[in-house]
Image (tube, rainbow, N blue to C red):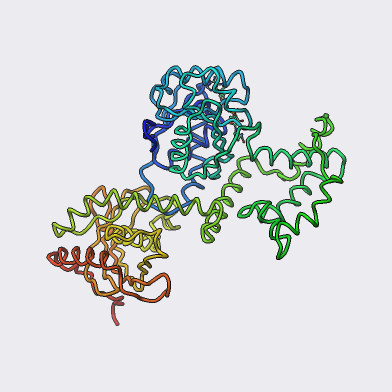
Amino acid sequence: MVENMRRVRTFGLLGTGVIGGGWAARALHFGIDVIAADVKPEMEDWIRGAVANAESALARLTSAPLPPKGTLTFTTDLGEMARRADFIQENIPEQLELKRRVLAEASRHAPAEVVIASSTSGLMPTDLQRDMQFPQRFLVAHPFNPVYLLPLVELVGGRDTSPRTLDAAQAFYTYIGMHPLRVRSEVPGHLTDRLQEALWREILHLVNDGVATTGELDDAIVYGPGLRWAAMGTNLIYHLAGGETGMRHMLRQFGPCLKWPWTRLEAPELTEQLIDRMVEGTQAQAAGRSIRELERLRDDYLVAIQQVLRQFDIGAGSTLRAVEERLYADSAASLQVAGEEAATAGQPLKTLETEVRPEWIDRNGRMAEGRCLQVFGDAADALFRLAGMNGVDRSAGGAFFAVESHVLHHAPAGALESIFVTTQVLGVDGNGVHLFHTLKRRSDGRVLATGEQHYEYASAAQGAAAPMHTAVRAKLDGIRAAHAKLRAPAQAGRHVVFPGK
Ligand SMILES: NC(=O)c1ccc[n+]([C@@H]2O[C@H](COP(=O)([O-])OP(=O)(O)OC[C@H]3O[C@@H](n4cnc5c(N)ncnc54)[C@H](O)[C@@H]3O)[C@@H](O)[C@H]2O)c1
């Protein structure tokens, strides 16, 4: 974190509507406490409901080990929120005078090193920070709905914003899984809303002129450009459209159309007739589905798309990969000190602490078998990190791959139960490691499952088994030597024995 700016443990929200609720869900999910302030006391129920609604999609976004969820506190006292928060995000209605007044008030309560950001869709930071105390700690941080699933946040500094504020904000938003986009200079609407508005203006014209319905115009995006946009923006896509000579050819071929021009700059008048057409059109598209139902559908496909993009390490998929990498590293680091001590004392290493996520439960109400393997895989990953492997550095150093696994199920686990895994190193040779994991329930120490695994090290370049890095080998040998003092697990070396055969 940037010098003098606070480490963010408590995220303060000013205004808890659609956007405030989205921020709360995202921050809590990544283990940050939230104190939310709104003038209306009834917003407490609303924000708690919004956080609960976001949970099912968020929980499916990643299986990386998450820290314990943050806690949510609600207040109608802006001053209390501002005094307790380490970072404040304002999300009140889009009115310059109101925002200016409320931001100035918050700035009188919040210590100077607390960053204050505004979610404004289009107001300029210089205008917003005018009456604030310590305006250098203010910036615009414009998110997108649903804030808990879309990683983009546009960061815009005003005339008085210090570069350190932008750096601190960038670090915080990255920590909670976002993609901060630094906007070079303030312009009304920042970047994305200018692009969105250009498209929307044209939609309003086409509907107004009776050229197309709202549904047909959405089809014009959804079946074509929309699919491309999830990973490549208009510019890179047009570069491809120009063939071998790329953008230069594209501009030569389609550039002249810009003079005709196809589109208009002024929006049409919002007449009653146009408003009716827009409302009736979108109601027909909704086809009787409630806003909640449509939100759930949207959230589900947003999760699935990001998981697909992760495989290509592109766009929002790269952001997801990066935050997962950080989560695995944090989880391994939190076990590192205890792990070092246990290794030298000849104890099995505690390699994973987590809880049984609701989506791991099968239709019989128990943690599904495959999830045991997933948990053992994460435990092995933590062990390899402890031994010096860095998951991001695979291209340079190769990685460990499971070649054989055997799982014994002892007792079922239920949703939200706290569990942990200990790992014993049974053997190490030139390119292989023999591991034994024990999965236990935290509340009573009961063994839920055990797993025996053989991992092989393979070089990234050749993709074939290869000798592991000498430092990693030395560390694993050290743990193996300490673990040699332990009793060999009774279940080790088993295969499936079917009674009566
Ligand atoms: N809705 C979107 O898609 C979207 C996307 C990005 C950014 N934004 C921006 O986020 C901000 C909030 O938008 P929203 O859609 O969440 O609005 P909203 O109307 O849903 O929520 C605003 C909340 O602010 C509260 N409020 C009003 N005055 C207050 C005060 N003085 N102190 C504390 N709370 C106060 C209201 O009670 C309400 O709960 C706006 O600046 C908007 O431009 C909205």
- Total number of numbered discs in the rendering: 0
Q: Where residue 487 sits in the image (x, y, percent)?
A: 14, 66
Q: Is 84 in front, or is 392?
A: 392
Q: Where residue 143 sits in the image (x, y, percent)?
A: 56, 38
Above or below, 55 against 344 in this view is above
- Residue drawn at the location 41% of the way across and 23% of the way down: 112
- Residue drawn at the location 41% of the way across and 20% of the way down: 80
Q: Is residue 4 visible?
A: yes
Q: Where residue 445 sits in the image (x, y, percent)?
A: 23, 52
Q: Is 334 in front, or is 493?
A: 334
Point out the image quarter for the C terminus.
bottom left
- Residue drawn at the location 33% of the way across and 50% of the way down: 331
Q: Is 208 in front, or is 418?
A: 208
Q: Is residue 149 left or right of residue 266?
A: left
Q: Is 56 in front, or is 96?
A: 96
Above or below, 71 against 107 in this view is below
- Ligand 1 rendered quadrant: top right
Q: Is residue 478 left or right of residue 433?
A: left
Q: Is residue 45 visible?
A: no
Identify the image quadrant of residue 366: bottom left
- Residue drawn at the location 43% of the way across and 23% of the way down: 81
